[in-house]
């Protein structure tokens, strides 16, 4: 093998109803996919960074998440009695950082998937766990709600045993996604969350998540979309994203079935159960943020990380 290359898609964390336990991989219906690519070769610098958002990453390669994940992967290989092949990595950074689109997760997943292909797939059973550990280098905890769907595709429910379970998604759903030219670091978004929650509010949140999971398995599209709401986390984070309240109201007025922050923001997503309304909803969702937004009508990416070998 001369080259191993992995693409990892953008993702929507939380999906409103499932803070830290639901995540959805997305792909624009038209145009180029949103995500990061990591390429591995035998020779070259330890890490080369390119792409539209490369200038936002640390100047020192040793601080880059991709290179840190390479160390994580090599340590796991050594623990199993294997030695990592020499590897020169290139990161094509296609996602903006602090975007709410799973940017760090995409880098982590692309790096680990490419490295595992380069080393013969010997750690395929450990990639989800390693991805969680890689994400923890940024967020401080091994949350799987972005790395899970970025690796596995689809809508993933992250369980208490450290695994993910795929949930069915209605084929007709479209996700209207808007990324305003803002940054919301995960640490800042977590800092505004309440340290305690009234019991009745917690119960309502659990009921909403349970309703969503049940409706999806029953194929009840409208009921599932109605359960994509967040009365617990979203109100605390909304002030971090100027224009969000107006954008949400506009999207719902245009026919969206649900709308919320994507992950910790500033990206915002709206769910359309009728594809014919998606373009109108997207326009309404983007308008309050003014010029410079990145926007797309997306569907669920069923594949997750995609690896090519040559």
Image (tube, rainbow, N blue to C red):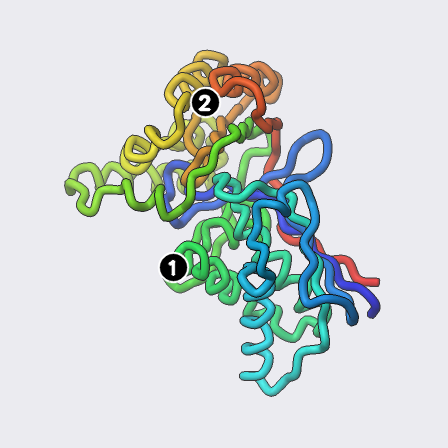
The residue tagged 2 is: 257
Q: Is residue 44 visible?
A: yes
Q: Which mark is first along the chain, 1 or 2?
A: 1
How packed mark 2 is, by other alpha carbons closer than 10 Å (few <14, some 14-19, many 20 or more), is many
Q: Position of residue 4 (x, y in %)?
A: 76, 63
Q: Nearer the viewer, residue 90 or 61?
A: 61
Q: Quadrant of the N terminus?
A: bottom right
116 is higher (above) or lower (below) than 199: below
* Percent position of residue 220, x then y: 46, 31
Q: Residue at x 73, y 59 (%)?
A: 39
Q: Height in image: 122 above or below 197?
A: below
Gap between marks 2 and 1, in whole Å?
32 Å
The part of the image, by quadrant, that contains residue 203 is top left
Q: Which residue is mark 1?
A: 141
Residue drawn at (44%, 40%), measured in percent from left and top? 263
Q: Rate crowding at label 1 as few (under 14), some (14 to 19) or many (20 or more) other CA atoms within 10 Å.
A: few
Instruction: Give the answer, above or below, for where 67 lies relative to 120.
Output: above
């Amino acid at each position: 093998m001369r080259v191993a290359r992995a693409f990892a898609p953008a993702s929507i964390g939380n999906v409103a109803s499932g803070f830290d336990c639901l995540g959805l991989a997305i792909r624009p219906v038209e145009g180029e996919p949103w995500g990061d690519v990591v390429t591995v070769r035998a020779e070259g610098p330890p890490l080369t960074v390119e792409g539209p958002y490369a200038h936002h990453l640390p100047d020192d390669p040793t601080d880059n998440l991709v290179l840190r994940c390479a160390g994580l992967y090599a340590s796991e290989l050594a623990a199993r009695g294997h030695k990592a092949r020499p590897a020169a990595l290139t990161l094509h950074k296609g996602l903006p950082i602090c975007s709410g689109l799973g940017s760090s997760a995409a880098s982590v997943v692309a790096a680990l998937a490419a490295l595992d292909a380069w080393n013969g797939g010997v750690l395929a059973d450990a990639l989800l766990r390693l991805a969680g550990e890689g994400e923890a280098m940024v967020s401080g905890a091994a949350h799987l709600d972005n790395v899970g769907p970025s690796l596995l595709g689809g809508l993933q429910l992250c369980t208490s045993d450290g695994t993910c379970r795929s949930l069915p998604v209605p084929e007709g759903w479209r996700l209207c996604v808007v990324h305003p030219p803002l940054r919301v670091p995960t640490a800042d978004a977590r800092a505004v969350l309440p340290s305690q929650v009234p019991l009745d509010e917690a119960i309502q949140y659990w009921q909403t998540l349970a309703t969503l999971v049940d409706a999806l398995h029953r194929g009840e599209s409208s009921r599932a979309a109605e359960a994509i709401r967040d009365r617990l986390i979203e109100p605390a984070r909304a002030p971090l994203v100027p224009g969000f309240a107006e954008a949400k109201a506009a999207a719902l007025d245009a026919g969206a079935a649900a709308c919320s922050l994507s992950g910790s923001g500033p990206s915002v997503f709206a769910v359309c159960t009728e594809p014919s309304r998606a373009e109108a909803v997207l326009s309404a969702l983007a308008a309050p943020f003014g010029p410079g937004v990145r926007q797309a009508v997306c569907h669920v990416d069923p594949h997750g990380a995609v690896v090519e070998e040559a």
